[in-house]
């Protein structure tokens, strides 16, 4: 029998347990190889050795206590690939990705080509739904041309044939149509990080809002006004539904705008925003000059871009800032994008 393992942990009331676990898991802070402990009316959650400030920001509205204790190790859980063993060729299993995205109750698995699973779609879909019990629909995402709306190229593999779902992050419910809108579930932590940085009363420009995850996170935490702009009418339609669905949770005001951001920025007066979010990694730097014009002095721009290294990402923004009134103040790697490429967030302040 395996010996218990000592680990750092947090104690929370059972009534807050599910929310705390969800938040910590999405931020990658939980030691998933260890079992959670139940103690009277509280639970002990084993966590990684992460910065205490990060924990306090993640659990900003939950009472908790830091602790150390011994925890039992979990038995390694099965993966969808384990389910497929003996049902499809081993060579095909080796070519499949280790994981897949889950948006609401829809799973999306990224494949290089549909040829890989020719005649095996049903088996693959069933395996994913067996492992992820909440999944009702399974789609394959295959490489395709990026459209104006940044859409995935999807092929239905099994389960219910629908693309509209309700995705949840940090207790916020969001409508997402995976075939008509762009949404990345891996950015949950980033959505929260930005919301925590916003100050009360700020006017925020979310320039490529999509279905509005940044705007919704900000509005649930802060009494601020967020102009959520997107050219995709389906994305704005989803956002409007989400605003109505979360109405009782919102402290701030979201103004959804379905238009080309260039047009909106061209008619806005200068120095109107305290903060702007440019989450369009392939083209964000193209919009930085006009975004800086619309920022107040000491205002912040959060720029998302793709780069191989942190130094290169900073240099890319520095080169634009040389001709603008701004300077880089912060940079962090957000998520993996492709082999040897990452999405970075670079913050600049207008002076």
Image (spheres, rainbow, N blue to C red):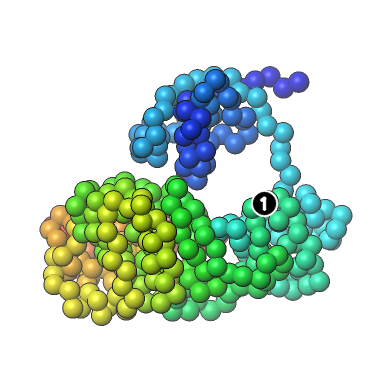
Q: Is residue 77 above or below residue 12?
A: below
- Spot the residue most to the right: 86
Name the side, left or right, on which 129 lies relative to 54: right
The structure residue drawn at horizontal position 39% and vertical position 55%, both measured from the top left corner, is 246
Residue 219 sits in which quadrant?
bottom left
Residue 268 sits in which quadrant?
bottom left
Name the side, left or right, on which 136 lies relative to 11: right
User: Where does the image place residue 72, in percent across and percent down from the top left?
Assistant: 65, 24
Which residue carries the number 1 mark?
Answer: 132
Q: Nearer the viewer, residue 98 or 61?
A: 61
Which quadrant does the C terminus fall into? Answer: bottom left
User: Where does the image place residue 217, in percent across and percent down from the top left?
Assistant: 36, 53
Q: Is residue 314 visible?
A: no
Q: Is residue 203 above or below residue 177?
A: above
User: Where does the image place residue 73, in percent across and percent down from the top left?
Assistant: 66, 28
Which quadrant does the N terminus fall into? Answer: top right
The structure residue drawn at horizontal position 50% and vertical position 45%, both measured from the top left corner, is 26
Q: Nearer the viewer, residue 227 or 248?
A: 248
The structure residue drawn at horizontal position 37% and vertical position 77%, both measured from the top left corner, is 231
The structure residue drawn at horizontal position 19% and vertical position 52%, both measured from the top left corner, is 201
Give the structural element (helix, strand or loop) at label 1. loop
């Amino acid at each position: 029998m395996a010996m218990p393992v000592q680990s750092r942990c947090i104690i929370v009331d059972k009534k807050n347990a599910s929310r705390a676990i969800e938040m910590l898991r999405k931020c990658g802070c939980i030691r998933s190889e260890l079992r959670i402990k139940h103690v009277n009316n509280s639970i002990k959650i084993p966590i990684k050795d992460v910065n205490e400030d990060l924990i306090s920001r993640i659990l900003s509205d939950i009472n908790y206590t830091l602790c150390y204790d011994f925890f039992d190790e979990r038995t390694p859980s099965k993966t969808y690939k384990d389910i497929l063993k003996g049902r499809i060729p081993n060579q095909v299993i080796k070519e499949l990705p280790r994981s897949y995205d889950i948006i609401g109750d829809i799973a999306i698995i990224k494949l290089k080509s549909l040829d890989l699973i020719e005649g095996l779609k049903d088996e693959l879909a069933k395996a994913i739904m067996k492992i992820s019990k909440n999944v009702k629909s399974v789609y394959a995402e295959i490489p395709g041309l990026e459209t104006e709306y940044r859409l995935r190229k999807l092929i239905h593999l099994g389960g219910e044939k629908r693309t509209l779902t309700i995705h949840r992050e940090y207790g916020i419910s969001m409508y997402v149509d995976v075939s008509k809108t762009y949404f990345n579930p891996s950015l949950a932590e980033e959505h929260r990080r930005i919301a925590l940085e916003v100050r009360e009363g700020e006017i925020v420009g979310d320039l490529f809002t999509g279905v509005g995850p940044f705007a919704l996170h900000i509005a649930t935490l802060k009494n601020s006004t967020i102009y959520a702009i997107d050219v995709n009418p389906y994305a704005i339609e989803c956002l409007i539904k989400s605003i109505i669905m979360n109405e009782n949770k919102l402290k701030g005001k979201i103004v959804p705008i379905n238009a080309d951001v260039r047009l909106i920025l061209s008619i806005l007066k200068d120095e109107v925003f305290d903060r702007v979010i440019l989450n369009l990694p392939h083209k964000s730097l193209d919009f930085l000059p006009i975004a800086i014009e619309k920022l107040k002095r000491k205002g912040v721009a959060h720029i998302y871009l793709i780069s191989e290294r942190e130094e290169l990402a900073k240099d890319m923004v520095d080169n634009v800032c040389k001709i603008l009134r701004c300077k880089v103040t912060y940079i962090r790697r957000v998520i993996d994008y492709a082999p040897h490429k990452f999405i970075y967030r670079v913050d600049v302040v207008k002076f």
